[in-house]
Amino acid sequence: MKLVTLAAACAALVTLSAAPAAFAGDVVVAKLAQPVPTATKLIAGEAVFNCEGDACVANATTSLTFSSSTCKVIAAKFGPVTSYTGVKAMDDARLAACNSVAVARAGGGVQTAKQ
């Protein structure tokens, strides 16, 4: 009985420790409604997004990178996100929630770190 319990505990530990790596290495791309004025880096969802033109791309991702909260960080900095893709595209409902925090970008009023 103890051996079965120990085996179950080991299996659970392996499963939980592998979960954060499930999305590791997948590219995540946020397409923006308006291009960024200059190449910019943004840290969000435990990844570095390189933003240039109308896209922000994260190459070294984690399981947190493809999330609504990370999308909201991008939308808050750069305005509406038209698509957010990783292994799959973010659905319309989650994309609408992401854009709920988007700020109006009038006259380039958003300040970000230059590359």
Image (tube, rainbow, N blue to C red):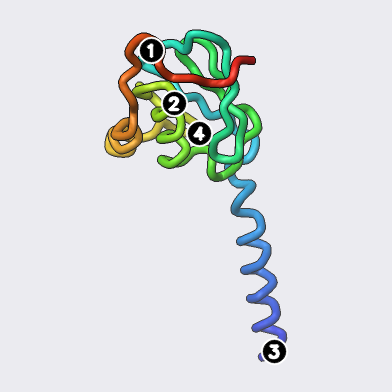
Say whether disc 4 or disc 1 marks the residue closer to the N-terminus.
1
Say whether disc 2 or disc 4 marks the residue closer to the N-terminus.
2
Pointer 1 residue: 34
Identify the disc placed on residue 77: 2
Q: Position of residue 18 (x, y in %)?
A: 65, 54
Labels 2, 3: front one = 2
Q: What element carries label 2?
A: helix
Labels 4, 1: front one = 1
- Identity of the amino acid at label 4? Val
Question: Does residue 90 appear to the left or right of 6 in the view shown?
Answer: left
Q: Where is residue 11 in the image (x, y as percent from the top left)?
A: 65, 68
Categorize mark 3 by other alpha carbons within 10 Å: few (<14), some (14-19), many (20+): few
Contact flag, marks 2 and 4 (Cβ < 8 Å): no
Between 106 and 71, the one nearer to me in the picture: 106
- Identity of the amino acid at label 3? Lys
Q: Distance between the residues labelled 2 and 4?
A: 24 Å
Pointer 3 residue: 2
Q: For the point 41% across and 12% down, which residue is it?
A: 108
Between 110 and 82, the one nearer to me in the picture: 110
Q: For the point 37% across and 24% down, which residue is it?
A: 81
- Identity of the amino acid at label 1? Gln
